[in-house]
Image (cartoon, rainbow, N blue to C red):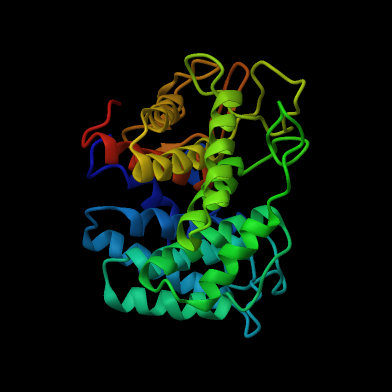
Amino acid sequence: MREHDRYHHLHALTDGRGVFEHALLDAPRPDHGYCVDDVARALIVVVRDPDPDPDLVRLSEIYLGFLESAIGTDGLVHNRMNVHGDWTDNHSMGDWWGRLVWAVGTAAARAPDPSIRARAMRAFQRVAQQQSPDLRTIAFAALGASEVAVIDPTDAAARRLLGALVDAVPASNGETWLWPEPRLTYANGSIVEALIVAGERLDNQSASDRGWELLAFLLQVESPSDRLSVTGSGGRGPEQTGPQFDQQPIEVAAIADACARAYELTGGEDWRRGIELCWQWFLGHNDSRTVMVDVATGAGFDGLERHGRNENRGAESTLAALSTYQQMRRLEPEPHV
């Protein structure tokens, strides 16, 4: 993926307010509006870039402004905005809240511009008033809190969210099915990454050890041969084997993030191999032998199907491809495309 082209499609999906959620093929669909989930993902991707240019800084300002406007005085969050700039839902709690916490926490730690970092930290403190009982929502929030804890290990809100994640992960379901739920569903990699990093930030060795165990189990289930085969949209239980569809790019990106975190902390070759399998999934080394990223523009395709792919290139899939490319690029300055 040529470095100056990799954000081409993300730029096409972005206007002065945020990122359009959907596309018809590669054409943005403004009539479908925006959502906090995708704008949060976009902010994480652009502030994680190791060599941001002025265009990426401008994108980070757009995305952060959108997220700031979504937060209510009580820390609850809107999710959906129409093309006219009107919120179409009430402030509430859901995955979008957790993803917003993740995004502003990441921006507070990693944005290249000091003013963006300061604004993001203020947004984190506003939204971190709240806490969710839902495992995935709190996992997303804990990933943002883990970034804030790097800046300030004593930050009370960050430590509270990290502790809440550790407490929220149920016990394993059996000796062979180690996953803490009866079925794998979505954001499985994010739960594992959050548990690993929460253990690290809180000096909780048992949480970290559990995270390592669950990541190894997840890779065992989802890469049974020489390629990645992520859980499909219907979920996967202990008795289900073989490929599933529709496989979502965001699930691949979550595993890449978890493996990258593990590799950063340990240097283990299993985790490096996990990152490589994730990027190869986008390049076509998957259950349908189908390329899932347009390397000329950075666009990701919306789902892997049994006989091909969903040809639409919306925000979620595009950001998943870009995120996975970032993790691979940390291993190889010029990843194979």
User: Would residue 29 be visible to someone looking at this image?
Assistant: no
In the rendered image, the vertical position of residue 12 relative to residue 188, given as above or below: below
Residue at image x 24%, y 57%? Answer: 52
Q: State which quarter of the image contains the C terminus.
A: top left
Q: In front: 149, or 286?
A: 149
Report how many numbered discs are placed on residues in the image.
0
Task: Locate residue 286 relative to residue 180 in the image: left or right.
Answer: left
Nearer-the-camera pick, 78 or 269? 269
Q: Position of residue 255 (x, y in %)?
A: 50, 38
| Residue for point 34% across, 74% down | 116
The quarter of the displayed image where residue 69 is located:
bottom right
**Picture coordinates of residue 23 (x, y %)?**
53, 44
Query: Is 232 displayed left or right of 200 in the figure?
Result: right
Residue for point 75% across, 25% down: 238
Say if residue 259 shows up in the picture.
yes
Residue 139, compared with residue 85, is above or below; it is above
**Location of residue 189 in the rendering, given as x and y in whole percent from the top left corner:** 55, 41
Q: Quadrant of residue 270?
A: top left
User: Can you say which quadrant of the picture contains the N terminus?
Assistant: top left
> Which residue is nearer to you in this view: 33 or 143?
143
Residue under the point 34% across and 60% down: 47
For residue 205, side relative to residue 233 (left or right): left
Q: Among all residues in the image, which is located at the extreme bottom? A: 73
To which quarter of the image does residue 101 belong? bottom right
Residue 306 location, x and y as percent? 63, 18
